[in-house]
Amino acid sequence: MKKISIAIDGPAAAGKSTVAKIVAKNLNYIYVDTGAMYRSLTFQAIKNGVDLQNEEQLMELLDKTEITLEATENGQIVRVNGNEVTSEIRNSEVTNNVSYVAKHKLVREEMVRRQQQFATQGGVVMDGRDIGTHVIPHAEVKVFLLASVDERAQRRHAENMEKGFPSDLEKLKEEIAARDKLDSEREVAPLKKAEGAVEIDTTSKSIEEVVELIMSLASERIR
Ligand code: CDP
Ligand code: CDP
């Protein structure tokens, strides 16, 4: 059967990774969480005291930073130079700084180069901000997921509560809106709907409904 590429973009907490993982599992494709790559570099930069505004220093660090994503039964494991960082890269310090790292042109070029290597054979579901516009613009299926800021903050809040993490809904709203703004207004590869992408507003949709919509778009292209 033909193996296609599926690009899923959208703002923070729109449900990209949740649905991307399920679609990848259904199709037996690999899932590439590109946000985890920018988060991993941000984590390393903070740990090593690298100035996040200094592109040259960030590039030096990225050169020495091997990022691996491994899908397991219990979810994705992210490693930096062999050390697991799966939960650390989701902490609020990384979350609130990652957009400053992701705005640099050279950083993005290197990340895109690494991401494109995953997609050479097809059979990939990749999520992020610039997947349909820059990383795999030839993807057979491109999706742009949306949801209101309130809904997205609620989702992250519910997720935090479930995990027993401290969570402040109003603060989450502000942080999500701030990150959306930085990601949409940056000069290099800003967050935007790719040409030919199908927009899905997930505000009042369940995960299953969104997965079903993407699976039907995929099956049209696999045939
Ligand atoms: O899951 P969430 O929406 O919170 O974020 P993420 O997908 O893990 O991405 C974290 C950050 O990485 C984003 O806010 C962007 O600044 C950056 N990013 C990017 O610039 N390009 C991508 N393809 C993926 C993420
Ligand atoms: O990857 P991204 O940041 O776009 O979002 P996510 O981490 O996949 O989803 C954020 C939260 O929203 C998760 O807890 C999902 O279970 C939830 N979600 C939902 O409630 N309804 C959807 N249609 C999609 C996701």
Image: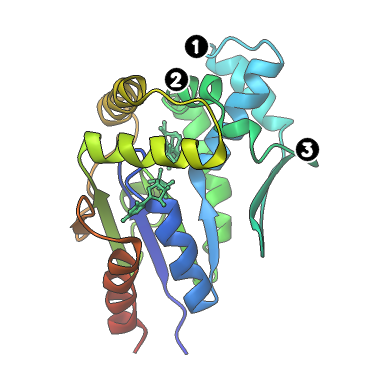
* Residue 20: assigned label: none
Above or below, 209 against 189 in this view is: below
Residue occupying the point 20% across, 57% down: 200
Task: Give the distance between the C-alpha atoms of the residues marked 1 and 2, in whole angstroms.
Answer: 7 Å
Q: Secondary structure at mark 1?
A: loop
Identify the secondary structure beneath mark 3. loop
Q: Amino acid at mark 1?
A: Gln
Does the residue at mark 1 contact the one at mark 2 (Cβ under 8 Å)? yes
Decide which of tag 3 and tag 1 comes sooner along the chain.
1
Q: Residue at x 27, y 52 (%)?
A: 145
Residue ID for mark 1: 53
Whether the residues at callouts 3 and 2 have beta carbons within 8 Å, the answer is: no
* Foreground pick, 11 / 101: 11
- Residue picked out by circle 3: 81
Query: How many marks are shown on the rendered structure?
Result: 3
Residue at position x 28%, y 78% in the image? 216
Q: Which mark is residue 100?
A: 2
Q: Position of residue 161 (x, y in %)?
A: 48, 36
Residue placed most toward the observer, 78 or 176: 176
Check disc 1: other Cα within 10 Å, few if <14, some if 14-19, many if 20+.
few
Q: Determine crowd level at label 3: few under 14, some 14-19, many 20+ residues with C-alpha closer than 10 A.
A: few
Q: CA distance from mark 3 to mark 1?
A: 23 Å
- Regarding residue 209, the answer to whether it shows in the image is yes
In-front residue for pair 75/197: 75
Classed neighbour count for the residue bearing mark 2: other residues with Cα under 10 Å, few (<14), some (14–19), many (≥20)? some
Seen in the picture, residue 185 relative to 158 is either above or below; the reply is above
The local secondary structure at tag 2 comes to helix
